[in-house]
Each structure stands twice: as structure tokens, then as C-alpha cells.
């Protein structure tokens, strides 16, 4: 009787192990399937915004900003900029969304190409936006709309901060 009980116990234990193994294998297969269904497709990095502030005959800060659709920012501080040299950082999704929304709200692509006057000592802000298959460049030196100036200030706000990381030049 002990022998039959022992054999019966081994059989039941063996069946339980196979059931658990089958369940685990199914879970692993489902996880693998889910991973394959949500394949990571890298975003192709494209230039989203360039903004350049030009010098004047005085001490106006001069710098250039390049913002990519991935949130990567390249910054080059030139004359009289708070940070001179090359820097980089990454903007958050919220910052990118805020900039994108303002571009849409102000009707950037419907603004004039140039806001200028016959004044030589004024700095300019030259901003180019590539979005939704459209590209537009605006020179803002004199009497540009307040909404455009607010966009320029928003870009400065998100880029010009302590999160900029100095890019070491290759020697």
C-alpha cells in the first residue's frame, strides 16, 4: 500500500510540475509576444527650431539655439551671452509641447517673414520653425508682434538655464 501511495504521489507531483511549467512557458511566450508587438521604433531626429539672436553695436547677447524634434538642444553662446561656448541639454516633453502649442496658437506660419526697419544698431532674432511638413523663417528686428516676442521668450526660458551642459571641444 505504501508503494502505491508513493507512486500515486509521484505521479500527482509530476503532473503538477508539468502544469506549472506549461503555465510559465505560456506566460513567457505571451510576454515575448507583447514585446514584439510593441517594437521600439526610434524617432528620426530632425531640426525643429533654430533661433539666433544677433549682436548690436553695444553689449547685446548674441547666441544660437537649435532644438530638435527629440527634445535635444544645441546652444552656442557668442558675444556677451551669459554662457559663451557650446552647450547641450534635453527639453522635457512638457516643454516641447508648450513650445509647439504656442507656435500653433500664434499662427506662426501666417506671420510676416520680416519685421524690420532702417535702424542699424538693433539686434535681431531670427527664428525658423520646421513643423508638420512646413518651414518658415522670420526676421524679427523691429516692431514684431507681441505674440512672436512671447514665443522667443518662451524658447529662451526653456533653454537658457542651469541645465545646459558644457560641450568639451575635441582637441
Image (cartoon, grey):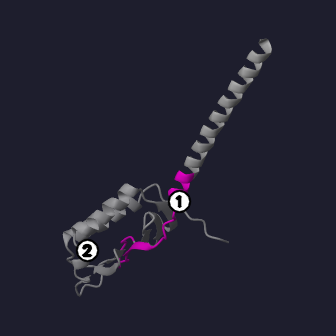
Q: Which residue is mark 1?
A: 39
Q: Secondary structure at mark 2?
A: helix
- Residue 53, given in percent of the width and then of the height, sits at 37, 74
Q: Which residues are magenta?
A: 33-61
What residue do we see at 42% from left, 68% from top?
69
The disc placed on residue 108 is 2
Q: Quadrant of the C terminus?
A: bottom right
Q: Quadrant of the N terminus?
A: top right
Marker count (numbered): 2
Question: Marks 2 and 1: in contact by CB < 8 Å?
Answer: no
Q: Quadrant of residue 156?
A: bottom left
Compared to residue 84, the image places residue 121 above or below, namely below
- Residue 109, given in percent of the width and then of the height, sits at 26, 77
Compared to residue 113, the image places residue 106 above or below, namely above
- Residue 102, given in percent of the width and then of the height, sits at 26, 65
User: Would you say 103 lies left or right of 89 here?
Assistant: left
Q: Secondary structure at mark 1?
A: loop
What is the crowding at mark 2: few (fewer than 14 residues within 10 Å), some, or many (at least 20)? Answer: some
1 or 2: tag closer to the N-terminus: 1
Front-most of residues 54 and 1: 1
Q: Quadrant of residue 115?
A: bottom left
Amino acid at each position: 500500500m505504501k508503494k502505491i501511495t508513493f507512486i500515486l504521489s509521484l505521479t500527482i507531483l509530476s503532473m503538477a510540475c508539468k502544469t506549472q511549467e506549461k503555465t510559465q512557458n505560456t506566460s513567457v511566450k505571451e510576454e515575448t509576444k507583447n514585446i514584439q508587438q510593441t517594437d521600439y521604433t526610434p524617432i528620426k531626429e530632425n531640426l525643429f527650431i533654430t533661433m539666433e539672436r544677433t549682436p548690436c553695436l553695444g553689449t547685446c547677447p548674441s547666441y544660437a539655439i537649435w532644438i530638435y524634434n527629440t527634445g535635444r538642444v544645441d546652444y552656442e553662446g557668442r558675444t556677451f551671452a551669459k554662457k559663451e561656448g557650446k552647450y547641450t541639454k534635453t527639453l522635457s516633453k512638457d516643454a516641447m509641447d508648450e513650445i509647439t502649442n504656442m507656435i500653433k496658437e500664434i499662427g506662426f506660419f501666417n506671420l510676416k517673414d520680416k519685421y524690420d526697419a532702417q535702424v542699424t544698431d538693433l539686434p535681431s532674432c531670427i527664428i525658423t520653425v520646421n513643423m508638420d511638413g512646413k518651414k518658415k523663417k522670420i526676421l524679427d528686428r523691429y516692431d514684431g508682434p507681441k505674440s512672436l516676442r512671447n514665443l522667443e521668450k518662451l524658447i529662451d526660458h526653456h533653454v537658457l538655464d542651469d541645465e545646459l551642459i558644457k560641450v568639451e571641444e575635441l582637441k
